[in-house]
Every structure is written in C-alpha cells, then in structure tokens.
Image: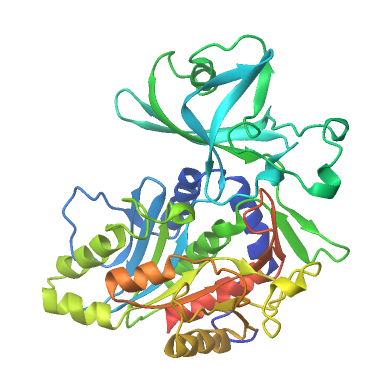
C-alpha cells in the first residue's frame, strides 16, 4: 500500500484488541473514543452551550453515542461534510430493573435479551458485568467488573439426550438468566455489590444501564495468526477505525470539506432513540455546525446536498460450512479487504454512484475490496445507512468488514481487514 492515504498496518489491529477489551459497553466505547480524540487535539462541546465558529476538532457525547468533526481553516457555512457512520452497541444480555432473582438455592441476575444475539454463544462462558450507574445527584459512573462473576449454565447432555440430534432449544425467559452465587435472593443485592465495587456510599445509585460481557480477551487465531477472534466487533471494529481515520485526517493539511465520525447507539434494535441514527442527534450537530459559521437554511441545504456518508458495519464472510446460504457469485473472504454492501430493496443504501465513491477511496488507499449481496432466498439485514440517507437526504454508501459468527458473544474476522478498512476511511475523508 504505497498510497499516501495508507496510514495503518497490523499495529492498528493490535490497538483494536486493546479498544475492544476496554469497551465492554457502548458507554465505555464512547469514553475511549473521546479520550483518543482529545489526545488528537479535539475538544468536547456541551449541547447546552452556544457553539462558535472556531476551527479544529470537536465532539459531543450523548449517552452511548458520539459525534466528532473537524472544521478546517477556511471552511464556509456551506462546506459539505464527509461522514463515517457506525454504531457502538452490540447484541447481549441486559440487566433488568429488578435484577435480583434466583431459584433452587441459586442466586441469579434477571436479564433481558438485547438485539438479535446468538443465545447459545452466551452459554458456559465466564461473564463480567459493565455499563453505567446514575447516582441520585444525576452524575454518572462507568462500571466494569471484568472478572468471572456470572455464568449461564447449559443443561447437561444426560438431561437432554436429543440436543445433538434435534438441536438446542432455548427459551429467552427461562434459560438465559445467569447464576452468580448461592443462597437466598436479597432485593438490592446486585446494586449494593456494585456500589461496594466502585467505592460508592450504599444507596447512592438511583439508576443503571448494565450488560453482561465475556471476559475472554481478543486473540489472534490460526497457524499464521491471520485471523482475529474477539467480542463486539459488530460494530466497535468500525468505531475504532473511524476514530483512527478522523484523528489522522485532522492533521492532514487543507481539506475542502468537514470530516465527521457519527457513532450511534441502539442500531441493534432499530435505531429509534435520542442516541440512535433514526433520532435527531446527527442532524442537530451538522445544522448547528453550519449555523455557528453564520450559515442560513440555504447554506445548510447546499452543505447537505454535497455531503456523503460511509455507513460502516460488519457483513457476512462466506462460511465454509454453509456456503449455500450465500449468494453463489458473491463470496466475501477474510483479509480480502472491506466490502461494499448492496441491496436493491434498500436494506443497504448503496447505489452505483456510491459504489464509485467507495471504489475511488479504495484505489487511492491501495486497498483491495469486495462486494456483498444476500442470497435471494435469505432475508437481508440492515444498517444505519438507509436511515441516514432517508432522514437527512444525504448520499450514503454501506460498507464494512466481512466476519463470521456475527452477533455471537465472540466473532471472527481477518486480522488485516481492520487496518484495510481504516486506510479506506482515511482516503475517503481526505478527498
């Protein structure tokens, strides 16, 4: 990759592993992204403050979402944006409002299934607990119990003799509640434990957004360490690449557009929230950026008309044991480079002109690329891409990295693909 746009190598993948480990929840992912951006010279803005026309890197945080952008010298009120879109949430098990439960002498945690997670992948794993606590005074505290705290035990084969012939059948309510101890159920036990873990006064926690995570760290896999196994790659792999790319182009010199990273929450359950892609957050940030530079509604319309978004999310690599589930002529492979995701029924937002934008970025970065389209007999998933395009009238292209085991507690990708994606993003943002 001799192009000047190529900035990242296998060291990027090493850093991704660090990012995944440090980000067991979307709130941790946002905090880690913000820390990296601050080191690159970005500063946080409050949505409740007035914004000025100053240049440089800026970002706002709302819950599990972060929007970051860099205003270059000479930017006008109608300067268009170049946006990397991603999401911070992953399918998992979320703690219920009344978390303390149990049966038959086992203490358990009541959880609700979040998103389309592969339930069986959470069985018989050592699980930690992470998220945010909200105190009575309104302040928030991130919490991460990153040790073997819980386990969802599978029924022994002796008590389910047909499991290997008829398949595993899991009831989301009855079979997915983790155990975390022995004894009688005590109301308030879990939150009291977390208060003690965090050194908080007992009774100081008023609310919580907590989730289970596997404590097994990411790892290179294979004889030649050419694969990467890890949690939450859907879609922290794209968030990490977007942060790295935005920080890189912020020092790239003169830009004729404003590069943006928009990492949303709640993609895995429809994006309809104040921190989701179907909410007002991105539009508000972009419009306020235009208006803070003295822009009018006409400037806003001109800016949006020239804006392009790369919606980056993971896609399906061809599965060696289930190749018939894939389109016969579209078989994305690990380490084959980022994928262009196409669906004519608008489950992805890519069209022919968007394809040209993506291909141009890959060529400038010296990066190989692939195409993904679903088998006609298989329902196609979706992303924030169509939502972004429809809500804001912004040209959007769906891309990503091909993985196996999507929505598993532990996913798999090619070890080179994360930095190939990041280099593509740099080329896109620099153009």
Pick the quarter of the image with the N terminus.
bottom right
Residue at 58% over, 34% down: 173
246 on left or right of 372:
left
Figure colour scheme: rainbow
- Quadrant of the rendered image containing residue 55: bottom left
* Residue 339 position in % (x across, y down): 60, 77
Q: How many marks?
A: 0
* Residue 44 position in % (x across, y down): 32, 52
- Quadrant of the rendered image containing residue 258: bottom left
* Residue 69 position in % (x across, y down): 35, 65
Identify which residue, 331 or 14, lies in the foreground: 331
* Residue 166 position in % (x across, y down): 80, 48
Residue at 54% over, 11% down: 186
Looking at the image, residue 171 lies above or below residue 31: above
Residue at 49% over, 87% down: 355
Q: Is residue 375 visible?
A: yes
Identify which residue, 78 or 171, lies in the foreground: 171
Pick the quarter of the image with the C terminus.
bottom left
Residue at 69% over, 51% down: 410
227 on left or right of 75:
right
Q: Is residue 79 visible?
A: no
């Amino acid at each position: 990759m001799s192009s000047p746009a190529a900035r990242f190598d296998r060291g990027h993948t090493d850093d991704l592993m660090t990012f995944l480990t440090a980000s067991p929840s979307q709130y941790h992912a946002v905090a880690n992204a913000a820390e990296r951006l601050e080191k690159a010279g970005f500063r946080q803005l409050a949505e409740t403050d007035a914004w000025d026309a100053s240049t440089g890197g800026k970002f706002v945080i709302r819950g599990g979402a972060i929007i970051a952008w860099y205003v270059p010298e000479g930017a006008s009120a109608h300067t268009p944006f170049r946006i990397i879109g991603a999401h911070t949430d992953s399918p998992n098990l979320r703690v219920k409002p009344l978390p303390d439960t149990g049966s038959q002498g086992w203490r358990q945690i009541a959880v609700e299934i979040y998103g389309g997670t592969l339930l069986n992948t959470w069985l018989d794993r050592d699980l930690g607990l992470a998220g945010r606590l909200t105190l009575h005074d309104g302040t928030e505290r991130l919490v991460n119990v990153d040790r073997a705290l819980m386990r969802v035990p599978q029924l022994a084969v002796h008590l389910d003799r047909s499991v290997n012939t008829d398949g595993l059948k899991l009831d989301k309510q009855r079979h997915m509640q983790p155990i975390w101890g022995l004894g009688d159920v005590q109301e308030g036990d879990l939150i009291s434990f977390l208060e003690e873990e965090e050194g908080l006064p007992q009774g100081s926690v008023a609310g919580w957004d907590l989730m289970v995570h596997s404590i097994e760290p990411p790892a290179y896999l294979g004889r030649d360490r050419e694969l990467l196994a890890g949690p939450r790659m859907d879609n922290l792999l794209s968030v990490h690449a977007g942060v790295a790319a935005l920080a890189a182009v912020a020092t790239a010199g003169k830009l004729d557009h404003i590069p943006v990273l928009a990492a949303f929450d709640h993609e895995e359950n429809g994006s309809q929230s104040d921190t989701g892609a179907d909410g007002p957050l991105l539009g508000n940030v972009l419009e306020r950026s235009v208006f803070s530079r003295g822009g009018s509604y006409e400037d806003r319309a001109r800016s949006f008309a020239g804006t392009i978004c790369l919606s980056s999310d993971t896609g399906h690599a061809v599965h060696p044991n289930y190749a018939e589930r894939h389109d016969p002529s579209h078989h994305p492979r690990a380490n084959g480079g980022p994928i262009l995701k196409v669906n004519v029924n608008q489950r992805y937002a890519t069209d022919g002109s968007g394809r040209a934008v993506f291909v141009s970025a890959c060529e400038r970065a010296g990066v190989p690329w692939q195409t993904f389209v679903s088998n006609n007999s298989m329902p196609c998933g979706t992303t924030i891409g169509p939502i972004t395009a429809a809500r804001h009238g912004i040209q959007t292209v769906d891309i990503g990295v091909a993985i196996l085991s999507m929505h598993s507690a532990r996913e798999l990708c090619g070890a080179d693909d994360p930095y190939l994606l990041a280099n593509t993003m740099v080329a896109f943002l620099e153009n």
